[in-house]
Image: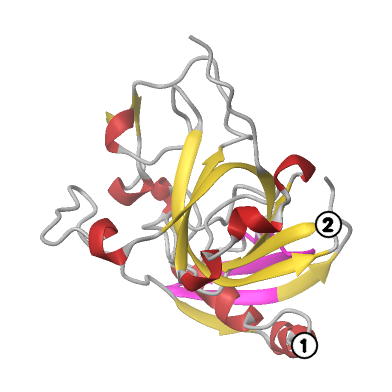
Amino acid sequence: MEYPFKPIGILHTCFKEKFGIPRQMNLVKQAPATLVFLPEFAREEAVRELSGFSHIWLLFVFHKAVTKNWPVMVRPPRLGGNKRVGVFASRSPFRPNPIGMSAVRLKAVEITDKGPVLHLIGVDILDKTPVLDIKPYLPYSDIIDHATGGFAPAPPEPGFRINFSDKALAQCTALENTLPDLKSIITQVLENDPRPGYCAKNTDKSDKIYGIRLFDFDLKWSVSFGDIQVICLDRTEDPA
């Protein structure tokens, strides 16, 4: 049997590469995105009454994680990147069917000349991700009392103090009109330590400089004895 799945729209987010994307939704609460519908689905009637919901579910494709040889077991970052669990006990993007789901906050439904645009925050999704469907989040049924979280029973504790260099702080201030909450977004991304799980315990001073592609700049930062130092925000052309 064939299933005629096709994207209804494309999600545009601040996360331009896999490295640095939050590992779960709403860990970076102000991370913005817009969902632009493809022409066939860009109809105002299709989103009528949607603005009454504070959150929505997104069903999407892990379009950069497609693999023919899906792993039966994976190493979740939450377990330090060393212990293996079954792929169906994880949220790994490498799956038999590369489908993801996230519940995100719906800030606004904008009606434009080219159809509706959804403005979202709290996303954990790569830029230019194809979206298969959206569904309203229903608190009375989607919240399950007394649910247990297996090996991830609670949100991860922020593991680092985030410091901004004078240069990085000035750059954030200069961008705050066009990129609201930028300093907060950077702080929350780095608090969750985007490095691979096997690096998580390494907090000693190092000369290594890390980089994350965020919005339209390269965020440079380093780790030193439990602190993260934000070095600068280099604005460059998007390589994609």
Image coordinates for residue 37, horizontal then vertical, percent: 71, 50
- Give the vertical position of 45 relative to 111 (above or below): above
Instruction: Tell me the SS state at disc 1.
Output: loop
Marks 1/2: CA–CA distance: 26 Å
Residue lying at the far top of the rendered structure: 1
Asked whether residue 183 is in view, the answer is yes
Q: Which of 125 and 163 is in front in this view?
A: 125
- Give the vertical position of 2 relative to 187 (above or below): above
Image coordinates for residue 40, horizontal then vertical, percent: 75, 40
Image coordinates for residue 209, horizontal then vertical, percent: 65, 61
Q: Residues within 10 Å of mark 1 (few under 14, many from 20)?
A: few
Amino acid at circle 1 = Asn
| Magenta-colored segment: predominant secondary structure | strand
Residue sitting at x 38%, y 41%:
91
In which quadrant will I find the C terminus?
top right
Give the label on residue 114, or none.
2
Give the label on residue 177, or none.
1
Residue 226 lies in the magenta stretch: yes
Splitting the image into 4 quarters, where does residue 67 fall?
top right
Which segment is the magenta one? 208-231
Amino acid at circle 2 = Lys
